[in-house]
Image (tube, grey):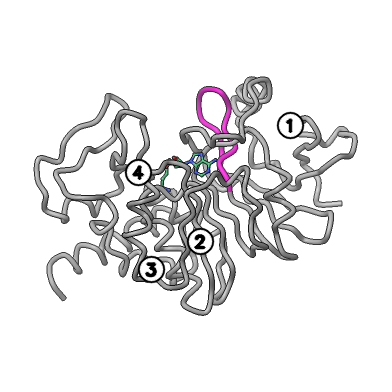
Amino acid sequence: MTNIEVLRAFYARYITAKGACRDPSVQAAFALVERENYLGPGPWNVYTLAGYISTDTSDPAVLYQDILIGLKTDRGINNGEPSLHARCLDAAAISRGETITHIGSGTGYYTALLAHLTGEAGHVAAYEIDPGLSAHATSNLAHLEHVRVLEESGTHAVLPRSDLIYVSAGATHPLNSWLEALNDGGRLIFPLTPNRGLGGMLLVTRVAANSYAAKFISPAQFIECIGARDDATGESLVSAFKSNTTAAVKSLRLKTPADQSAWFVGADWWLSTSEPA
Ligand SMILES: C[S@@+](CC[C@H](N)C(=O)[O-])C[C@H]1O[C@@H](n2cnc3c(N)ncnc32)[C@H](O)[C@@H]1O
C-alpha cells in the first residue's frame, strides 16, 4: 500500500468506529473513495466554529481526518463531516443494486460513496442546485456510469422511485415528494433542522404504503435545503430539539390528528413516540 492508502484506510477505520458503524462495506467504501478527487486543488479551507483555517498544504494526507472542508466558503457550503456521514450511510443499510437519490451532492464525494455502496448494478441520481458545484460533481463523477448528476432542485424535481433518498441539506419537514418517491422498504435520511442550534438526522422507513417508522440517528447542523424550509416550523423545532428527547421518536405520521404520543407536530405531519400505525 502507498502511504496515502494507509492513511485512507486508517481514516476509514477511525470514522466508522466513531460513527458506530456495523456494516463493514461502509468502512471499505471510505477506504476506497479518494476524497482528494472531489475537493479541488489544495490548500483547502477547514471549517471550525471560529471560522475557516487553511491547511497550508496541498498534500492530500491532510484530508484524512474527521474534518469539514470548505467547498464555497463565502456561502458556508462544506464537504460534510465524515463520521456523521459514516453513521448515516450505515443506518441507510444500502444493498447492492438499489436506486438512490442524493439531494445536495455538492462536488460529489458522498455521492461517490453512495455509488460505491450500491455498486454498478444500482443507480444514483444526484441533485445539486448550485451550478458551479453541480458542474464539478458532473466531472468528478464522470467515471461512474451508474451516476447521473442533475443541476436541479431536489425539492422541485419529480424524483425517480428510490430505495434510498439521502438529503445533505437541512429541512424543516419531510417533503411529500420525497416520501411518495420511496419504494416499499425505502429509506429517507435527512437533516431535520431548526432555525438555530442543533437538529437531528432523521431516518424514515416506509414500512407499508402509508406507514413510516422514524428515528433520529445523530445530532446535525446543516445549511438550508432550498425549498424545504418553513420559518414557523423551524422556530417550533428549536424548543423540540432543546428537550433532548429525540431518542423517543419511533414513527412519522401523515395527515392524521396528533395524539398524546406526539413528539413534534408539523403542518400535516407529526413525529410520534409510538410504533408505526
Ligand atoms: C452541506 S452542503 C453538502 C454538500 C455535499 N453533500 C458534501 O458534503 O460535500 C449542501 C448542498 O446542498 C445543496 N442544496 C441546497 N438546497 C438544495 C436543493 N433544493 N436541491 C439540490 N441541492 C441543494 C447546496 O447547494 C449544497 O451544495
Binning the other alpha carbons within 10 Å of mark 2 as few (below 14), some (14 to 19) or many (20 upward) gives many
On the image, the x and y values in percent for residue 257 come to: 90, 34
The label nearer to you, 1 versus 4, is 4
Q: Amino acid at mark 4?
A: Gly
| Sooner in the amino-acid sequence: mark 3 or mark 4 | 3
Residue placed under numbered mark 1 in the picture: 264
Q: Which residues are magenta?
A: 190-200
Residue placed under numbered mark 4 in the picture: 132
Most distant residue in the bottom direction: 121
The label nearer to you, 3 versus 1, is 3
The label nearer to you, 2 versus 3, is 3
In the drawing, does residue 248 fall left or right of residue 114? right
Image-quadrant location for residue 208:
bottom right
| Sooner in the amino-acid sequence: mark 1 or mark 4 | 4
Q: Amino acid at mark 2?
A: Asp
Q: CA distance from mark 3 to mark 1?
A: 35 Å
Q: Name the quadrant of the N terminus.
A: bottom left
| Sooner in the amino-acid sequence: mark 4 or mark 2 | 2
On the image, the x and y values in percent for residue 194 come to: 58, 27
Q: Amino acid at mark 1?
A: Phe
| Sooner in the amino-acid sequence: mark 2 or mark 3 | 3
On the image, the x and y values in percent for residue 272 come to: 78, 40
The label nearer to you, 4 versus 2, is 4
Q: Secondary structure at mark 2?
A: helix
In the drawing, does residue 259 fall left or right of residue 163? right
Above or below, 99 against 221 in this view is below
| Sooner in the amino-acid sequence: mark 3 or mark 1 | 3
Is the Cβ of the residue at disc 3 closer than 8 Å to that at disc 4?
Answer: no
Q: CA distance from mark 1 to mark 4?
A: 37 Å
Q: Which mark is residue 29?
A: 3
